[in-house]
Image (cartoon, rainbow, N blue to C red):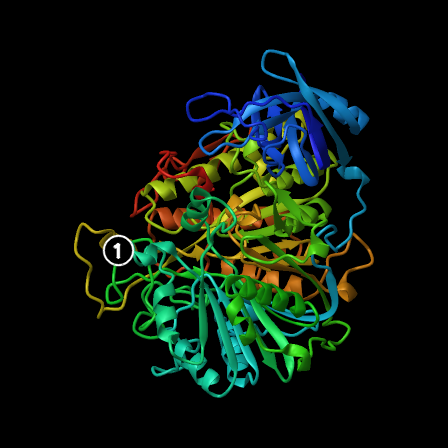
């Protein structure tokens, strides 16, 4: 059958089946005698290409002991896939291995031409072609060109809230110095960046009623301020506020490894330390395990061991109004950094009590520290109600006996009254399932379902929606980049988020329409951890497969259209690195033959990008906790949160004009930090001149990094060290097949040491 490209949505209604075969057997493979003890059927829908499943698009709940089951479930899934058929399979749920009962296949051409099949009864067969009952279902394809695009993401749990106020932060602390202040705002003045951790500290100190914190990691021994040597620690600050009568509640991810002394500290979350620190105080801290409490022991243990609670948010009152901070920055060690991203210079000053390096083995007195790039935001307005709803529902599910501790916020205000130009529309998105939060029943029709478990994957939906509606450019800064595995050269079925495929489809459309459209993607040089380790190498392999797939498709379209262009003219990947000219003379040398010693000689290190940021046309911005991988985007794995925001009164009326609002200013400031200067070309990021200018900066810094040129790098943007050919083929560079100093293949290696569900 012919493979066809489907771009849009697929809607599936699974109603019921009848006269299914009974394949239930005992451990001894003997059919059970009890009349009511029959197969436990569920239905799975898989996309098929070249004879193999590339993506599972739907899976119903299990109906126990029933050969005439009624599921009455519906599914709505975005699609950006090539496939030749959809395979519908009914299976019997068993403890050890599910057993096939019967199936049918739908030709992709029939669905593409007719747009809808059913509702109708369709015959099912076993592998021998024998009739085995019927299924009543319908499947509908909604092409992308039929959709009317708006800023609000439709079909998700939370609506857009108007008249909000937003403040955007780069890094934990951004001094008002050049090149940041070289950016000119829409008011014609130099940009004065806000300070994230200083603002959080100020709001916490002034809170009178409540401080709620959700964190992947919260460390009591760090200080939010770094002005002098004796700043109050976060733990002391929260205890003090609780003793003043402020309701301080906290949820941190319960890292399972910390429950065992041998593995304690593997992820550096400090959850046990933080929990013990607040025991017996007025601060109420809960450890939130990521479990599957309504599943079997195996499923519960797997979820706990492999998935995390990854939301990061601070909710508090400010002048009798509830406000919030959310984004990528954990309130833990190693995250405080400035746009200088020093390696050694701050070891005895700002980082004297906050040393962190999770890539190499070293110490605070030897260095280097691990520089940290991140994005965060502050928000006021009615959207904060949704953030509060998220916290309260998670708290009640986790500790119902402690629900009485939740502050009665009936006396708190949410609304704010920003000026017309400072008014934002904001929408709340999540990745989370019913294991971790209680969903209101009135939202069940909006939520998705898998094996009967409700889940919210609206962060992925938001990314897809705004990639599809983008007209000029997209800038993404993210800790990971992997997905769309149905299109990989070597396919897997466990990394199916559509973000890479959607970006590729949008670029291909621009090429075919001769449109100026650019995508800039900034990722870490490598995932955090030892780059030679099996886990990091697997992550790098999935990243390579993703990028390889994107460039292959783009290169093919460039050849077919006959234009004179290179794939990187439309899509370019970057990372951030730091070089210093010298280390302080009073730092002792690390032992020879260590990686720390090699780094001291080269004075170079990566800046770890932890951001979760996407900017579309300078009009719309997504900031949150979600990485571009399956863990964050799936909805059934890690719990995540994000806010999508825009300034409706600053959107230009002429679609050809660029938006000059606060998102535009923020991007210019961020790019000035990365490039070491505010560049004229940054004003028009959809132009080929801008892309060429960014690539030129990136290639220059790549050359300097490879050759360890001894100079302070105020310019950090570096081209990612892949070699991209004209036809879209991707190779490691000859001078960068392994990471300098640390080793480890740049393209990664799949060693099959870890569950794919963990490393994707």
Q: Nearer the viewer, residue 52 or 199?
A: 52
- Residue 488 appears at what percent x and percent y? 53, 31
Q: Residue at x 57, y 39 (%)?
A: 568
- Residue 695 appears at what percent x and percent y? 53, 47
Q: Residues within 10 Å of mark 1 (few under 14, many from 20)?
A: few
Total number of numbered discs in the rendering:
1
- Residue 54 appears at what percent x and percent y? 57, 29
- Quadrant location of the N terminus? top right
Q: Residue furthest bottom?
A: 244
Residue 487 image-quadrant placement: top right
Residue 162 image-quadrant placement: bottom right
Judged from the image, the secondary structure of the residue bearing numbered disc 1 is: loop
- Residue 522 appears at what percent x and percent y? 52, 50
In the displayed structure, does residue 332 sit left or right of residue 492? left
Residue 316 in view in this figure: yes
Establish if 175 lies above or below 59. below
């Amino acid at each position: 059958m012919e493979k066809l490209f489907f771009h849009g949505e697929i809607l599936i209604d699974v109603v019921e089946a009848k006269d299914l075969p009974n394949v239930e057997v005992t451990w001894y493979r003997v059919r059970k005698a009890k009349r009511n003890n029959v197969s436990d059927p569920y239905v799975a829908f898989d996309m098929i290409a070249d004879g193999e499943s590339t993506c599972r698009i739907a899976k119903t709940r299990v109906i126990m002991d029933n050969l005439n089951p009624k599921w009455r479930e519906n599914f709505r899934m975005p699609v950006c896939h090539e496939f030749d058929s959809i395979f519908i399979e009914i299976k019997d749920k068993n403890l050890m291995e599910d057993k096939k009962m019967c199936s049918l296949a739908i030709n992709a051409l029939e669905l593409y031409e007719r747009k809808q099949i059913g509702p109708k009864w369709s015959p099912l067969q076993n592998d021998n072609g024998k009739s085995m009952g019927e299924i009543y279902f319908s499947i509908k394809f909604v092409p992308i060109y039929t959709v009317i695009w708006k800023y609000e993401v439709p079909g998700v749990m939370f609506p857009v809230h108007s008249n909000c106020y937003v403040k955007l932060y780069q890094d934990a602390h951004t001094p008002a110095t050049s090149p940041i202040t070289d950016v000119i705002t829409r008011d014609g003045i130099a940009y004065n960046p806000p300070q994230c951790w200083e603002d959080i500290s100020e709001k916490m100190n002034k809170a009178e009623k409540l401080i709620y914190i959700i964190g992947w990691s919260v460390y009591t021994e760090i200080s939010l301020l770094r002005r002098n040597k004796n700043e109050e620690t976060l733990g002391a600050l929260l205890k003090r506020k609780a003793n003043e009568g402020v309701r301080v509640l906290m949820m941190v991810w319960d890292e399972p490894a910390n429950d065992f002394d041998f593995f304690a500290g593997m992820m550096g979350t400090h959850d046990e330390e933080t929990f013990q620190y607040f025991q017996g105080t007025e601060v109420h801290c809960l450890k939130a395990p990521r479990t599957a409490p309504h599943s079997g022991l195996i499923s519960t243990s797997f979820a706990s061991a492999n998935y995390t609670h990854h939301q990061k948010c601070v909710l508090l009152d400010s002048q009798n109004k509830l406000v919030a901070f959310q984004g990528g920055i954990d309130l833990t060690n190693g995250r405080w950094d400035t746009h200088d991203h020093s390696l050694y210079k701050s070891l005895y000053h700002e980082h004297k009590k906050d040393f962190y390096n999770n890539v190499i083995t070293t110490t605070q007195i030897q260095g280097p520290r691990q520089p940290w790039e991140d994005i965060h935001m502050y928000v006021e307005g009615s959207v904060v109600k949704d953030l509060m709803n998220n916290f309260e529902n998670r708290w009640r599910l986790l500790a119902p006996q402690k629900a009485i501790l939740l502050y009665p916020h009936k006396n708190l205000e949410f609304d704010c009254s920003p000026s017309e130009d400072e008014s934002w529309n904001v929408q709340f998105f999540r990745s989370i399932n019913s294991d971790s939060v209680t969903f209101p029943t009135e939202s069940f029709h909006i939520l998705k379902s898998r094996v009967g478990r409700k889940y919210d994957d609206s962060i992925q939906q938001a990314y897809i929606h705004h990639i599809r509606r983008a007209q000029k450019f997209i800038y993404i800064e993210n800790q990971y980049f992997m997905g769309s595995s149905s299109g990989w050269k070597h396919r897997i079925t466990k990394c199916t988020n559509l973000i890479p495929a959607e970006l590729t489809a949008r670029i291909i459309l621009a090429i075919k329409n001769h449109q100026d459209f650019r995508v800039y993607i900034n990722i870490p040089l490598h995932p955090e951890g030892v780059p030679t380790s099996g886990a990091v190498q697997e992550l790098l392999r999935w990243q390579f497969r993703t990028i390889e797939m994107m460039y292959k498709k783009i290169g093919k379209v460039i050849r077919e259209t006959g234009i004179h262009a290179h794939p990187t003219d439309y899509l370019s990947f970057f990372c951030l690195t730091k070089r210093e000219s010298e280390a302080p003379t009073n730092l002792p040398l690390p032992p020879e033959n260590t990686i720390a010693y090699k780094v001291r000689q080269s004075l170079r290190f990566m800046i770890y990008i932890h951001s979760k940021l996407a900017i579309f046309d300078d009009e719309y911005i997504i900031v949150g906790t979600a990485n571009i991988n399956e863990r964050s985007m799936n909805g059934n794995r890690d719990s995540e949160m994000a806010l999508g925001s825009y300034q409706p009164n600053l959107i230009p009326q002429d679609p050809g004009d660029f938006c000059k609002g606060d998102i535009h200013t923020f991007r210019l400031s961020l790019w000035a930090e990365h490039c070491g200067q505010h560049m004229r070309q940054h004003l028009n990021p959809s132009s080929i001149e801008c892309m060429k200018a960014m690539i030129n900066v990136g290639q220059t810094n790549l050359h300097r990094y490879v050759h360890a040129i001894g100079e302070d790098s105020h310019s950090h943007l570096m081209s990612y060290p892949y070699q991209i050919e004209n036809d879209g083929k991707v190779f490691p560079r000859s001078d960068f097949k392994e990471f300098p100093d640390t080793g480890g293949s740049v393209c990664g290696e799949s060693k099959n040491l870890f569950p794919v569900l963990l490393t994707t």
